């Protein structure tokens, strides 16, 4: 009786995905394994998991279970970043892009500002940003955190010399302040403070630089040509802060320099950048880019040519087919595991949510997808999507793809 | 002198059927009208000698439009404004509304997040004072989700909350020590008390549940964001009437949990991305919500509402959605919305059942006066 009461009080739905091949991303593959979901959390993963009484059991034998896809750069999802104010106050959890997103396995993304055209468009950094969950029908947890990062493209890469020096000066002031603060605290701990000595005050106008140098927030820059990439590396080598480069088309030229600077990259394997015929050096884009960067030790997240969810244009180029973006990187020589990481755990790391999602691990948030095949195969469809333990998509009931090769996943309730 | 005699005259409406909305329908009944009010209604009502008699096939109460801007010559934009300020009694729109069967309109000020208070008017043109039923109605909010709107609404409610709590505290202190409370401590100037502005007072009445919020949202997501703001004031008795978009089915269960009062378009539409038909009014009925209907084009309101009945809305609920429910939403149900003793004689004379496809509106009566007669 007490147990029953306790179970009722807990009031958390328990779902077990049973018999599928579980691709954990970080801990290998469990063939014919079980993923147990309680509430919004993954309670257990393995091949000998006891299923509690009353749990909803989904027989996914013959299917594969993956963590939900994460896009390191996206636009327009949930109606997109608002022109002003916070995304958490305006995102639409019923937006078509939310429903189509989860229908294609997308569960979290880095939302960039900017409008999306019918034809989509290249992913690029553009000011305000938020890391969002695709919590269809729910606004409470629709945003992981915002602002998601600082966009330094305009302030550093595309700036004329004078504002560039201003930015350098701000970094210098911030660095000096941090050094002075450290020195003060060390002397305070040793009891060697001068009489009436006060804690150094941070200089005005450098809040962002302080946040960057203390690694509270990430920065992004949109760089294609090597000259731009090199300029971005110059800043981060002088003042180390967490930086992600978007585009990086000519990054294959000196991948070691990017690796040494500890900079992460967001890459579109299908990007086209013409050779610079006037330059007396290698230039242009290569499909091997992701593979070369990965080999050099750079963390690479993968994105498609269109950063949005589009029902127009050419199919297979937007976030509805994020795994195909990874497949093209594999075509260029990237190992399959690294490609998978590029749309899961590495993308999560770039978004700053890798401790909560991006892999199937006990204690992580239950963002899971059930696929009917290899994610990098063009025929593979998402059968079910869970966000924070809640089933937000079922291919057989949602109107979008139910007519394509329908298959049933048997569902039952665990009896004693 | 002449008008006085006419006004005092008694009118008897003899009808084959009276749809009272308040209770059972009456066959072969009589409605007795004196001074513009319903004096009696029933099967066995004695008609006094000399009474003017009107015969009709079907009589029902005049319709109440719960959300209209007809005859408003201005917009508003703050809580202390009311639609009554912008009323243009000479507007031709009122006659058009009357021709469609509307005898009462609930007018809302537009413009801005908090646009002002509603006013209820009769559609019989005349001096503004004579038309007004209520000049101090619900507070209308047009909510689209943004940080700016959420913060502005929250700020207004928080200010009102502060004043209510200060009032309570003051009342308690006065109770405790009636003498000490009056004397300020020596050497200390008494703190200047912050007085609530007119807008603050309006929001205070909202928090006390004395005044409803009339909230328009553009989509279901707007509701979720709106609830995020007002749910922080759960200690208070906020009463809300929602003006809802067709995609309300996405939040039907949540509207049901809140026992929402809602105004919807009387439409049958398609579920997004499907060929499945959906009727927002029926969704509300199934969620056990109370609903009124507000059509975009007023001309065919009876026909539009009949369509709802075809798609599963309960006939009685559909009739109420046109009359008593919107009157109750606006707090004017003691005067209009049904055919009952003591209420205004606002009546529609119909050739057949109101939901009959071939029904004609023969006459419209407002407070005993015929304001429209079918020329055909």
Image (tube, rainbow, N blue to C red):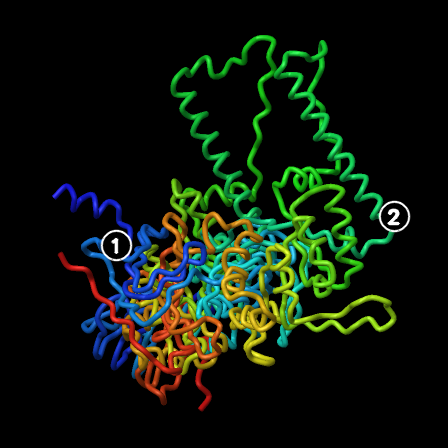
Task: Work out how far the residue at label 1 is from the one at label 2, CA to CA, in angstroms.
Answer: 62 Å
The answer for which chain carries disc 1 is A
Quarter-of-image position of residue B24: bottom left
Of callouts 1 and 2, which one flags the residue occurring earlier in the amino acid sequence?
A: 1
At a point 68% along the width and 39% down the height, the residue shown is A213
Which residue has dot 1 on it? A49
Q: Nearer the viewer, residue B273 or A279?
A: A279
Q: Nearer the viewer, mark 1 or mark 2?
A: 1
Q: Which mark is residue A162?
A: 2
Q: Which is nearer the eye, A37 or B150?
A: A37
Q: Position of residue A320 (x, y in %)?
A: 52, 72
Visible residue check, residue B39: no
Count the marks: 2
Relative to B368, residue A359 above or below: above
Which of the numbered marks, if any, corresponds to residue B131? none
- Mark 1 secondary-structure assignment: loop
Chain under callout 2: A
* Outermost residue toward the bottom in this view: B376
Mark 2 closeness class: few <14, some 14–19, many ≥20 residues within 10 Å: few
Which of the image's four quarters has the N terminus of chain A? top left
Residue B6 position, x and y percent, is: 42, 70
Q: Where is A362 relative to B343, above or below?
A: above
| A348 horizontally vs B292: left or right | right
Query: Observer-nearest residue: B83 or A241?
Result: A241
Within 10 Å of the Cα at label 1, are there few (<14), some (14-19), or many (20+) other Cα atoms? some
Of A357 and A2, which appears nearest the observer? A357
**Which residue is at a point 71% across and 14% down the rendered structure image?**
A197
């Amino acid at each position: 009786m007490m147990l029953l009461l306790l179970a009722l009080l807990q009031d958390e739905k328990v779902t077990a995905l049973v018999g599928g091949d579980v691709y954990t991303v970080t801990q290998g593959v469990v063939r014919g394994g079980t993923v147990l979901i309680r509430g919004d959390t993954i309670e257990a993963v393995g091949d000998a998991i006891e299923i509690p009484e009353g749990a909803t059991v989904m027989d996914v034998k013959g299917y594969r279970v993956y963590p939900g896809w994460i896009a390191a750069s996206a636009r327009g999802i949930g109606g997109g970043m608002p022109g002003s104010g916070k995304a958490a106050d305006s995102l639409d959890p019923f937006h078509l892009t939310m429903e189509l997103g989860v229908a294609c396995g997308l569960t979290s993304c880095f939302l960039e500002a900017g409008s999306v055209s019918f034809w989509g468009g290249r992913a690029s950094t553009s000011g305000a940003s938020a890391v969002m969950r695709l919590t269809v029908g729910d606004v409470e947890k629709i945003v992981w955190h915002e602002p998601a990062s600082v966009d330094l493209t305009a302030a550093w890469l595309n700036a004329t010399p004078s504002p560039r020096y201003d930015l350098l000066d701000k970094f210098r002031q911030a660095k000096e302040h941090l050094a002075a603060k450290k020195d003060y605290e060390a002397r305070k701990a040793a009891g060697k403070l001068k009489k009436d000595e006060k804690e150094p005050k941070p200089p005005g106008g450098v809040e962002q630089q302080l946040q960057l140098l203390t690694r509270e927030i990430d920065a992004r820059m949109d760089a294609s040509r090597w000259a731009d990439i090199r300029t971005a590396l110059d800043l981060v080598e002088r003042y180390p802060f967490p930086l992600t480069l978007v585009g990086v088309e000519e990054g294959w030229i000196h991948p070691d320099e990017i690796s040494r600077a500890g900079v992460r990259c967001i890459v579109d394997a299908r990007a086209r950048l013409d050779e610079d015929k006037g330059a007396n050096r290698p230039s242009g884009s290569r499909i091997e880019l992701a593979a070369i960067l990965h080999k050099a030790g750079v963390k690479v997240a993968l994105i498609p040519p269109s950063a949005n969810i589009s029902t127009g244009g050419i199919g297979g180029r937007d976030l509805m087919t994020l795994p195909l973006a990874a497949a093209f990187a594999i075509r260029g020589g990237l190992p399959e595991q690294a490609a998978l990481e590029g749309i899961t755990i590495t993308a999560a790391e770039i978004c700053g949510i890798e401790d909560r999602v991006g892999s199937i691990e006990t204690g992580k948030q239950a963002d899971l997808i059930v696929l009917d095949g290899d994610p990098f195969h063009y025929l593979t469809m998402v059968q079910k999507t869970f966000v924070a333990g809640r089933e937000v998509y079922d291919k057989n009931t949602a109107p979008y793809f139910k007519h394509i090769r329908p298959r049933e996943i048997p569902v039952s309730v665990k009896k004693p | 002198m002449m008008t006085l005699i006419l006004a005092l005259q008694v009118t008897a409406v003899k009808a084959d059927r009276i749809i009272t909305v308040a209770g059972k329908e009456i066959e072969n009944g009589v409605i007795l009208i004196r001074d513009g009010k319903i004096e009696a209604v029933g099967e066995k009502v004695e008609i006094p000698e000399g009474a003017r008699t009107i015969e009709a096939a079907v009589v029902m109460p005049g319709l109440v439009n719960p959300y209209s801007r007809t005859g408003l010559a201005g917009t508003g934009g703050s809580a202390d404004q009311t639609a009554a300020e912008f009323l243009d009694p000479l507007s031709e729109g009122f006659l058009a509304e009357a021709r469609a069967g509307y005898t009462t309109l609930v007018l809302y000020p537009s413009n801005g997040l908090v646009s002002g208070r509603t006013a209820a008017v009769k559609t019989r043109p005349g001096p503004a004072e004579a038309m007004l039923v209520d000049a101090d109605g619900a507070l209308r909010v047009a909510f689209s989700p943004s940080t700016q709107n959420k913060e502005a609404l929250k700020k207004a409610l928080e200010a009102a909350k502060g004043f209510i709590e200060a009032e309570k505290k003051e009342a308690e202190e006065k109770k405790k020590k009636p003498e000490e409370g009056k004397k300020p401590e020596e050497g200390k100037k008494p703190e200047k008390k912050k007085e609530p502005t007119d807008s603050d007072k309006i929001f205070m009445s909202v928090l006390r549940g004395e005044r409803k919020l009339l909230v328009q949202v553009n989509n279901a997501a707007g509701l979720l964001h709106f609830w995020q703001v007002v749910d922080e004031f759960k200690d208070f008795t906020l009463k809300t009437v929602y003006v809802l978009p067709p995609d309300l089915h996405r939040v039907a269960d949540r509207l049901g949990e809140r026992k929402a009062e809602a105004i919807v378009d009387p439409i049958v539409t398609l579920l997004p991305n499907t060929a499945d038909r959906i009727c927002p009014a029926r969704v509300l009925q199934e969620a056990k919500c109370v609903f009124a209907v507000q059509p975009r084009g007023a001309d065919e309101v009876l026909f539009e509402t009949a369509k709802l009945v075809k798609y599963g809305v309960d006939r009685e609920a559909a009739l109420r959605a046109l009359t008593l429910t919107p009157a109750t939403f606006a707090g004017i149900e003691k005067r209009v919305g049904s055919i009952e003793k003591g209420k205004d004689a606002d009546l529609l004379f119909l050739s057949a059942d109101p939901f009959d496809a071939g029904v004609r509106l023969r006459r419209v009566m407002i407070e005993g006066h015929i304001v429209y007669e079918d020329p055909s």
